[in-house]
Amino acid sequence: MISNLIKQVFAFAAIWFVLIYLICLFLPLHYFNAEYPMWKSKMEVMESENTFSNLIIGDSRAIAGINPNALGPSYYNLALGGGTPMEGYYSLKRMLEAGKKVDTIIVSYAPIHFEQSEMFWDRQVKYNFYDLEEIDEIFNQMNTNNEIFWAYDGEKNFEESEKSNLMRRAYKTYFKFPTELRTELSKSFLLRGYTNYGVYKEIKNRRGCFDFGRAQFSNDLNVEAKRTEFSPKTVLITSLEKMFQLAKNNQIVVMYASLPMNRTSFDALSDEYRKGVEQMDARLKRKHPEVEFINPALVYYDDVYFGDASHLNKKGRERFTFELKQFVTKSLFEPQNSLTGLEFAQ
């Protein structure tokens, strides 16, 4: 009797596990948050045949702040929310290996995305942006200092012996083991499909552009303004330089543009943080004269141009894209319209 009961329990548990596992494998649009359809749409563009030879590569600030439609029909915004130069490098590498024609890349990353890749496990790996070979390459070749690049502070490095544990976690996450998706499954109740499909269609229609903050102004402090010093990870800076070198080897024009902060956050930056970002910017400019650095590493707009603490609103996007286009097309414009944080002439 007890033996039969145990068998039934195990059979039920096995059926339940298989069901949940199939859901994890085939219904990601229904349990991931709205970032997933954004990443999915852009990964599809990287893999598909298209005529987009001029690309925006960066993070969510670039998604919200650069409108490819205003730059021209051959532009596409491939920036990724929570993305770092590591994803930028692999995005370009992937497209070139697929034989895609790339003429120009406009690159932009917030200072915080040189300090950490906070979403590495929850987006990059869970969304299958990286294949297992690339993850192995990151841990065993790119990350030579064994940095814990997915966290801001705390322990900065891990032991060599821990790599096997990290790869085991990567395998389980990549193959959608339910144990690695507990949070998404419990919070979503598999009810996010309709909303996520709407996001997917919108970002496709807008060629990769999307609004994060939609307020008329924001004077909230961004992440950088809350930090005392700038602590970049070597693997993230190296990834940016590998992207620059890859572009140079393939005769691709690279323009680097820093998205502005809101005035409140810019003024609140600590002197140490500001100094660290400016020093990194100066080193990159010296080392990579082939890259056109459009503006300083730290710039600002007034708070009325921001939809939240970190992202430009519609008004801010129109202004920044206008200014960027002037540079891209080599047109001269008044100093008041430059990317130095000054206001437009009234």
Image (cartoon, helix red, strand yellow):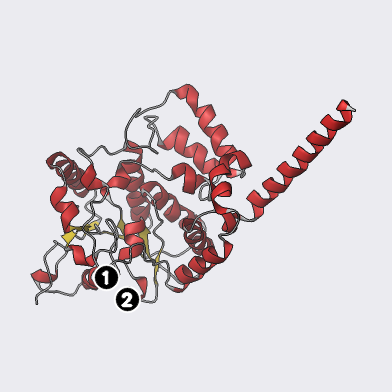
Amino acid type of the residue that numbered disc 2 sits on in the rendered structure: Ala
Residue furthest toward the right?
A: 1
Image position of 138 with respect to 49: above or below = above
The spot of residue 289 in percent (x, y) is 21, 52
Residues at marks 1 and 2, CA–CA distance in whole angstroms: 7 Å
Q: Mark number for residue 70?
A: 2
Image position of 285 with respect to 136: above or below = below
Mark with earlier residue (1, 2): 2
The spot of residue 160 in percent (x, y) is 45, 23
Q: Secondary structure at mark 1?
A: helix
In the rendered image, the quadrant that contains the C terminus is bottom left
Amino acid type of the residue that numbered disc 1 sits on in the rendered structure: Thr
Residue at 55%, 46% in the rendered image: 131
Mark 1 and mark 2 residues within 8 Å of each other at the beta carbon: yes
Location of mark 1 (residue) = 321
Q: Which is nearer the eye, 241 or 275?
A: 275
